[in-house]
Amino acid sequence: MGCCGGGDTGAGALRAEEARRQQNINEGLTEIEGVFSGFNPAFYRGREQAYINYALPQLGRQAREAQRKAVYGLGDRGLLQSSAARTLMSNLGYETNLQKQNIADEGTRQAQELRRAVEQGRSQVVAQLEASANPLLAKQQAFASASQFNAPSIFQPLGNLFQNFSTLYLANRLNQAYAPLINAARGAGVAPPITGQSYAIRR
């Protein structure tokens, strides 16, 4: 009987130990949730907007430079008052709006990527807590994990967003608009106008 009583005591001790372990884990989970509570929808919206605020001024500078090159190219060929100029500027506006949307999409993508990283970090801390059943250690690990996500993001500068527009579309469009003037001059038996002369072509 004494033997059986001892067995019951041992089983009871194990149950008590497991209960304490679960209590410690629950305390640790509460600590972890408290540390990570700041990673809410408003936090991710803020990170998304931070990227947009970073990228839009760069887009603006690039768009103005693309417009400057377009105006120079049009003026150099006497096409500033042409329908080609209107079409070119319209397409530049379209390209600028497209790049604005790309920036907004990239901001969303970065916010979603950050959310996944935060959840992964939180899951790792929870897994460590379940192994250690140490709520104090879990809190320290949660702070260490969260701190890296709370730090301001470092964004990469934008590349040349108007490269295709400048090198392909702009050059092709200007050449297409200028070609009739050159062909007309050749057909009349005179030298084509040289770049830099002012010829207003209305098409």
Image: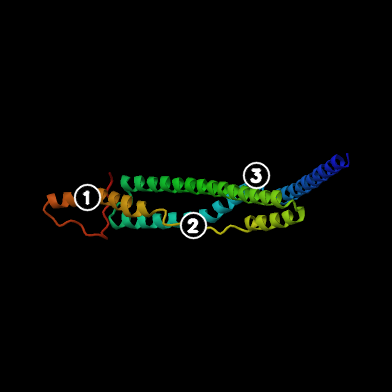
User: Taking 31 as reference, is 172 left or right?
Assistant: left
Residue lying furthest left: 189
Q: Secondary structure at mark 3?
A: helix
Q: Of the residues shown, which amino acid type is indicated by label 1?
A: Ala
Whether the residues at callouts 2 and 1 have beta carbons within 8 Å, the answer is no
Q: Position of residue 123 (x, y in %)?
A: 64, 48
Is residue 107 something that shows in the picture? yes
Whole-Å distance between the Cαs marked 2 and 1? Answer: 34 Å
Q: Residues within 10 Å of mark 1 (few under 14, many from 20)?
A: few
Between disc 3 and disc 2, the foreground one is: 3
- Relative side of 162 to 18, left or right: left
Label 2 belongs to which residue?
Answer: 58
Front-lying residue, 95 or 42? 42
Front label number (3 vs 1)? 3
Q: Residues within 10 Å of mark 2 (few under 14, many from 20)?
A: some
Give the residue drawn at x 42%, y 47%.
Answer: 93
Q: Which mark is residue 179?
A: 1
Which circle marks residue 41 in the picture? Answer: 3
**Disc nearer the start of the sequence (2/1):** 2
Q: Could you give the CA–CA distance between mark 3 and mark 2, rounded to whole angstroms?
A: 27 Å
Task: Of the two numbered discs 3 and 2 on the same chain, state the one appearing first in sequence.
Answer: 3
